[in-house]
Amino acid sequence: MAEVFAYGEVGIDNIIRVPHLPTLELAAFPTSDTYHIGGAAANTAVTLAAWGVRVRLAGNAIGDDERGRSLRQWLSAHPALDLSDLEIRSGLATPFCRILVLPDGERAILVFGYPQTPKTSLTSAMLDGARFLALDLYGGAEHAEAARTARAVGVKTVVGDVIWPDHSVLPLADIATNSAAFIRQEFPGADLLAHALELRRISGGIVVTTDGSNPVHVVDRDGAQFWLQPPRVEVVDATGAGDAFKAGLIYGLLQGWELRQAARWAVAAGALKVGRLGASSQPPGVEEVTAMSERVRDG
């Protein structure tokens, strides 16, 4: 029986490392071109499964095409990952992203197929035995319905990138993990602290704001705040850093740790992820994350 249900994007990432982005007059010559597990839900699920957490995965359907077969093979390599709810549709093109990764690890992303790919509805029976729903928001109304289903059966929802105060999922989120860069993009000039406190007021839950190498800001359910400083690491590829952070936070809470300790472990998981190519192709081990967490300092 799974402890976590990961629901959302499932697909393939084609990661292309380039020295610079191409322009109309300047070609870019890739230094590597590789394929990886992709999609926020799949990344979170694989990372948790690599740490021995029992996880079930569903969201968008995938195809029986070459990409879909490769994806199933890669996912099946994780014994703790239950794929029984992952829908396979004949004739469907498996969604994927082409991701141009720059030398500093930042990315430009082209998305193929995710918006129009059929989605699997999450039912209460699928959540049987789960303690957490790991949810992403890349899709439509099915994500709010998934959060409502989880709330109805007492499963805590951990959602990424729910940065809009009027979003239908926010009041259903027990934990929101957000990116400061995304907030700045959507709300130029926003006061990040005030923004996080407003999200917490609406959700009544925990709100976490990551900010690259800057301190991670955490607001607990009671409104108390603390900051954690990520360790310095060499950044190779930022793809999936938020998914690794979310997985790390869930892992810590499953161990019964208090919030600060769980968040410290999540920061360590995210720091290790950015040093590796691909969102979840090389998940760090538990001992590796634990050692890195000792380098996370109060901000």
Image (cartoon, rainbow, N blue to C red):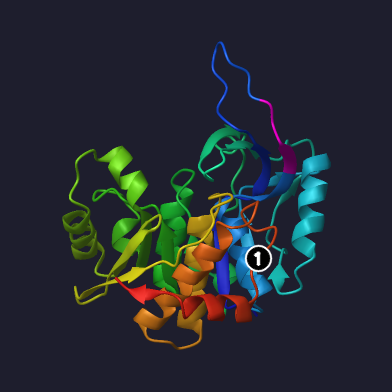
**Residue behind mark 1:** 283
User: Residue reaching furthest top?
Assistant: 25
Assign the N terminus to one quadrant of the image. Answer: bottom right
Q: Is residue 273 left or right of residue 35?
A: left
Q: Secondary structure at mark 1?
A: loop
Q: Observer-nearest residue: 203 or 127?
A: 203
Evaluate whether residue 174 shows in this view: no
Image location (x, y in percent) of residue 197 = 19, 62
Q: Is residue 211 left or right of residue 265?
A: left
At 79% across and 65% down in the image, what residue appears? 77
At 72% across and 63% down in the image, what residue appears? 83
Q: Is residue 273 above or below residue 64?
A: below
Assign the C terminus to one quadrant of the image. Answer: bottom left
Evaluate whether residue 152 shows in this view: yes
Label 1 CA crowd tier, 10 Å (few <14, some 14–19, many 20+): many
Image location (x, y in percent) of residue 100 = 60, 35
Q: Which residues are magenta?
A: 29-34
Q: Is residue 59 above or below residue 148?
A: above
Image location (x, y in percent) of residue 91 = 78, 35
At 20% across and 54% down in the image, what residue appears? 195
Does the magenta-highlighted stretch encompass residue 65?
no
Q: Is residue 180 left or right of residue 79?
A: left
At 57% across and 61% down in the image, what residue appears? 273
Q: Amino acid at mark 1?
A: Pro
Q: Observer-nearest residue: 240 or 144?
A: 240
